[in-house]
Amino acid sequence: MKCVSYNIQYGIGLDGRYDITRIADAVRGADVIALQEVTRNNPKNGGRDMVAELRAALPDYFAVFGPNFEADLGSSIKDGRAVDVHFQFGNMVLSKQPIRLSRNLLLPRRRSFDKVNLQRGALEALVETEFGPVRFYSVHLDHRDPDERLEQVRFLRERVLNYGIEGGGLTGLSELGMPEPPLPESYLLMGDFNMLAGTDEYLALAGRSDPSMGMPLSAARAVDCAAHDAGAEPATTWVEPKDPEDTGLHKRIDYAFVSPDLAPRLKASRVDQAATGSDHQPLWVEFG
């Protein structure tokens, strides 16, 4: 099972051009794709409908889109009809297998005064895989404030670990004579976490390493795939657009965190550092 996460920066690459084809090419072939910064009617990319364009570029994938907010950008009456023009910003999950159930988790945020603060989210998608049903999350955390990120991580962790109690987006279908959706323990969190390894936000999700025992697998902790893969040194995932050649400015802020039951199946974690379709680069993880 191959999975990839990519913050596509509303389609704008390191060369300043919008190119949905190179983004689709960079993720094509994965079984599950998690995308962040997918937009509709975004002034920064000419108002493209990225959801429609991605569906057209990847026609053999099932997909869900979770807008974290909608902001009016000139809705009006035309020929007697109301025409909505809304700026949407959110996450997307695409899968080779049908997505059985999804919900968009809106993460905690605070009002800001001097920096733009967008509503962030984690799009949850339940997919049948060769390992059984798995919950996949396309995650995007705040980029400005570590305290806000910590609140978001704690909220997300609670939703993920309490899934069996809360039941995801839909339960009680027996009342309608329909089968209940599965409640799998297995999950994979992928996305732009905007945090560095070792920070409070990171440790709240992945836990602390013991000096003697290291990092034993625990139901209370998610496993950082890049750190768990003994064959790979964790690579950077973000490039400074103003100076892409200065590797000293690159950062590892995109992650794939897997449930401990799936961690032994991890075969590889890598970053496609040749990709130029965004200021981020695709993070691939493979399970077998």
Image: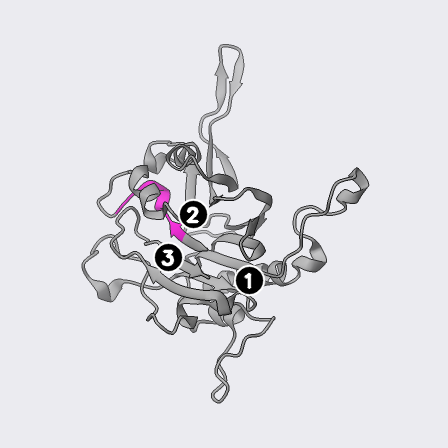
Element at badge 3?
A: strand
Q: Is 148 located above or below residue 26 in the figure?
A: below
Q: Where residue 94 appears, x then y in whole percent?
A: 47, 44
Amino acid type, label 2 = Leu
- Give the CA distance from mark 3 to mark 1: 24 Å
Instruction: Tell whether 280 sits left or right of 74.
Output: left
Instruction: Tell whether 24 sits left or right of 216.
Output: left
- Along the line of sight, which residue is nearer the eye, 145 or 283? 283
- Give the CA distance from mark 2 to mark 1: 22 Å
Q: Which residues are magenta?
A: 5-13
- Along the line of sight, which residue is nearer the eye, 130 or 209? 130
Q: Residue furthest top?
A: 79
Mark with earlier residue (2, 1): 2
Element at badge 1?
A: helix
Q: Where residue 108 appears, x then y in whole percent?
A: 56, 55
Instruction: Tell whether 45 sits left or right of 91.
Output: left
Q: Where residue 72 appears, x then y in whole percent?
A: 49, 31
Q: Where residue 241 appears, x then y in whole percent?
A: 25, 52
Amino acid type, label 3 = Leu
According to the image, label 3 marks what residue? Answer: 283
Q: Is-magenta flag for residue 11?
A: yes
| Crowdedness near tag 1: few (<14), some (14–19) or many (≥20) residues, C-alpha within 10 Å | some
Instruction: Specify the label residue 11 is tagged with.
Output: none
Q: Is-magenta flag for residue 272?
A: no
Instruction: Specify the label residue 151 is tagged with.
Output: 1
Amino acid type, label 1 = Glu
Mark with earlier residue (2, 3): 2
- Give the CA distance from mark 2 to mark 3: 11 Å
Instruction: Specify the label residue 35 is tagged with.
Output: 2
| Crowdedness near tag 3: few (<14), some (14–19) or many (≥20) residues, C-alpha within 10 Å | many
